[in-house]
Image: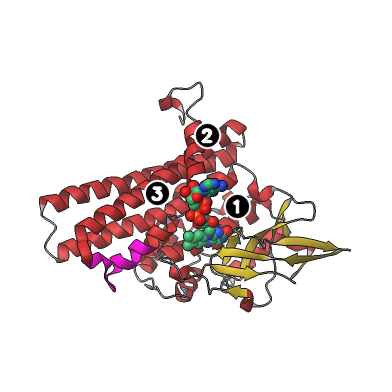
C-alpha cells in the first residue's frame, strides 16, 4: 500500500467548501435510465474524484482521516442519494486499489480519476456470476454482474470474479463497450438515477496487470465488513436532507410552531443526530482497526459497524415515518422533493443481509466485558 499521508495537507477545507456549494445545486434526477453525469463532472472539477486516491502532488487534495471522508460522503448524500451511492462506490474502489494495488496500478487509477473517470465496485451477481477463465497464458471473463451502480457510465469498475480454483479475485477490467450494460430491469421505487443495472463481461480479455491483489483479498477483514460505515455516511446525508426538506415545508406553510409538529421535529432530530453519532464512531473505529491490524481491533470494529448499520437504518425509517406524518399527503406528491428523497432513502436503506449484520453485532455482547467497555 502506498503511503499517502505525507502530503495530506492542502485542500481538505477547500474541498469541503467546494462540495458544500456544489451539493446545493445537484440535479434532482428521478427518471428511469437517468444518471447525474453533470454532477459527476462537477465533482471531478473540484478534485473530488482524485481525492480518495491520495496524491503525490503538493497541489492535489487527499482525503485521509475518517472524519473527513465521513463528512464528504454525508455532504454528497445530502445533495442526492444516487450521486452519493455512485461516489461511495468510487471511494470503495479507491480504498481497495490503494490497499492491494501495485504502485503502477495506483498510479494508473489516479491518472484515470484525474481524467474524470468514475470508479465503482461491482460484486453482486446472480446465477450467471463472473468467472475468470485461464486458457494457456490468456485470461478471459465470462458472466455478468447485477445491481451494478453506474452500469454503462462507470468507466473503471472493480469487479470480483471466481478463479478456476474457486477463489475470489479482484479485476480491473478495461471496458470496451458501454452497450454491455443493461438497465432495463432497473425500474426501481427510488435511486433511479443511480443507473444500477447488470453488466455482461463475457468475452473481455484481462491482462495480468488488471488483476488486483491476491485470492480472497476482496473479502479480507476488517475492511470488507467494517467498510460498510461508508454507505451509512451517505444514508445519513439522505436522512438529514429529509429533515431539511420537512423543515422548509412546515415553515413555508406556517405549521412550524404547532406543538405536535415541534415534538415530532424533536424526535426527528434525535433520530438524525443518533445516526450521525453512530456514523462518526463507526468511521473512526473502522479506520483505526485497519491501522492497528490486530484481530481484536478487527472484531471490535466489525461488531460496531454491523450495529451502526442497523442503527442508521432504524434512524432512517423513523425519520421517514415522522416526516411523512408531519407533512402529510403533500410529501407523496410530485414534484415535492420530499416525495423523491423519501423513495431514494427507502431504497438505499436496503443493504445486504441486515439480519445477519444485527445478529453478528449482538453476538459481540457475549464477551467477558461489561457492555460499557465493549468499544472503549
Ligand atoms: C441503489 C443501490 C445500488 C447498488 N449498487 C451496487 C453496486 O454498485 N455494486 C454491488 O455489488 N451491489 C450494489 N447494490 C446491491 C447491494 O450491495 C445489495 O446486494 C442489495 O442492496 C441487497 O439488498 P437486499 O434487500 O436484496 O438484501 P438481502 O441480503 O437479500 O436481504 C433481504 C432480506 O433477506 C434477509 N436475508 C439475507 N440473506 C438471507 C438468507 N440467506 N436467508 C434468509 N434471509 C436472508 C435479510 O436479512 C433481509 O431481511 C446496490 C443496491 C442498491 C439499493
Range of the magenta residues? 330-343
* Count of all numbered marks drawn on residues in the image: 3
**Image quadrant in which the C terminus is located:** top left
**Disc 2/disc 3 C-alpha distance (Å):** 20 Å
| Residue drawn where x is 48% and y is 68% of the image | 194
Extreme residue toward the top, this view: 368
Residue 236, image x, y percentages = 38, 53
Helix, strand or loop at label 3? It is: helix
> Is residue 148 or residue 36 the one in the foreground?
148
- Give the residue pinned by disc 2: 300
Lower position in the chain sequence, tag 3 or tag 1? 1
Proximity of marks 2 and 1: CB atoms separated by less than 8 Å: no
- Going 42% across and 60% down the picture, which residue do you hit? 347
SS at circle 2: helix
Q: State how far apart marks 3 and 1 are (Cα).
A: 33 Å
Find the residue positioned furthest to the right.
136
Q: Specify which label sits upstream in the sequence, 2 or 3.
A: 2
Cα–Cα span, label 2 and label 1: 26 Å
Does residue 135 belong to the magenta stretch? no
Mark 3 vs mark 1, foreground winner is 3
Name the residue carrying label 3. Answer: 313
Q: Position of residue 57 (x, y in %)?
A: 59, 61
Which of 132/277 is in front? 132
Q: Is residue 257 left or right of residue 7?
A: left
Rendered position, 3 above or below 81: above
Locate residue 105, reporting x and y percent.
70, 60
Residue 4: mark: 1
Front-most of residues 15 and 167: 167
Residue at position x 76%, y 61% from top? Answer: 132
> Under tag 1, what secondary structure?
loop
Foreground disc of the pair 2, 3: 3
Amino acid at each position: 500500500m502506498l503511503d499517502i499521508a505525507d502530503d495530506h495537507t492542502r485542500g481538505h477545507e477547500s474541498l469541503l467548501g467546494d462540495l458544500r456549494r456544489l451539493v446545493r445545486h445537484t440535479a434532482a434526477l428521478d427518471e428511469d435510465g437517468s444518471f447525474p453525469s453533470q454532477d459527476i463532472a462537477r465533482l471531478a472539477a473540484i478534485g473530488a474524484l482524485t481525492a480518495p486516491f491520495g496524491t503525490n502532488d503538493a497541489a492535489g487534495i487527499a482525503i485521509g482521516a475518517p472524519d473527513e471522508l465521513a463528512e464528504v460522503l454525508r455532504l454528497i448524500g445530502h445533495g442526492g442519494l444516487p450521486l452519493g451511492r455512485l461516489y461511495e462506490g468510487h471511494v470503495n474502489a479507491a480504498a481497495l486499489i490503494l490497499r492491494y494495488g501495485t504502485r503502477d496500478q495506483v498510479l494508473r487509477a489516479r491518472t484515470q480519476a484525474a481524467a474524470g473517470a468514475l470508479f465503482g465496485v461491482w460484486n453482486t451477481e446472480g446465477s450467471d456470476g463472473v468467472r475468470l477463465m485461464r486458457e494457456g497464458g490468456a485470461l478471459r471473463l465470462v458472466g455478468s454482474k447485477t445491481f451494478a451502480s453506474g452500469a454503462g457510465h462507470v468507466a473503471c469498475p472493480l469487479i470480483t470474479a471466481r478463479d478456476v480454483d474457486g477463489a475470489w479475485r479482484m479485476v480491473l477490467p478495461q471496458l470496451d463497450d458501454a452497450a454491455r450494460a443493461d438497465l432495463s430491469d432497473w425500474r426501481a421505487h427510488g435511486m433511479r438515477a443511480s443507473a444500477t443495472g447488470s453488466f455482461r463481461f463475457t468475452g473481455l480479455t484481462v491482462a495480468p496487470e488488471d488483476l488486483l491483489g491476491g485470492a480472497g483479498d476482496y473479502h479480507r477483514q476488517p475492511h470488507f465488513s467494517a467498510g460498510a460505515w461508508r454507505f451509512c455516511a451517505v444514508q445519513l446525508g439522505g436522512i438529514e436532507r429529509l429533515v431539511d426538506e420537512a423543515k422548509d415545508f412546515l415553515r413555508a406553510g406556517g405549521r412550524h410552531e404547532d406543538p405536535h409538529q415541534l415534538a415530532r421535529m424533536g424526535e426527528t432530530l434525535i433520530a438524525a443526530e443518533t445516526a450521525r453519532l453512530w456514523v462518526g464512531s463507526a468511521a473512526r473505529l473502522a479506520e483505526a482497526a485497519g491501522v492497528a491490524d490486530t484481530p481484536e481491533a478487527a472484531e471490535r470494529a466489525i461488531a460496531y459497524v454491523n450495529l451502526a448499520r442497523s442503527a442508521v437504518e432504524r434512524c432512517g425509517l423513523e425519520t421517514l415515518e415522522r416526516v411523512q406524518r408531519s407533512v402529510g399527503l403533500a410529501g407523496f406528491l410530485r414534484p415535492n422533493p420530499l416525495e423523491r428523497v423519501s423513495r431514494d432513502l427507502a431504497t438505499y436503506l436496503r443493504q445486504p443481509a441486515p439480519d445477519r449484520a444485527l445478529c453478528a453485532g449482538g453476538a459481540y455482547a457475549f464477551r467477558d466485558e461489561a457492555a460499557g467497555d465493549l468499544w472503549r
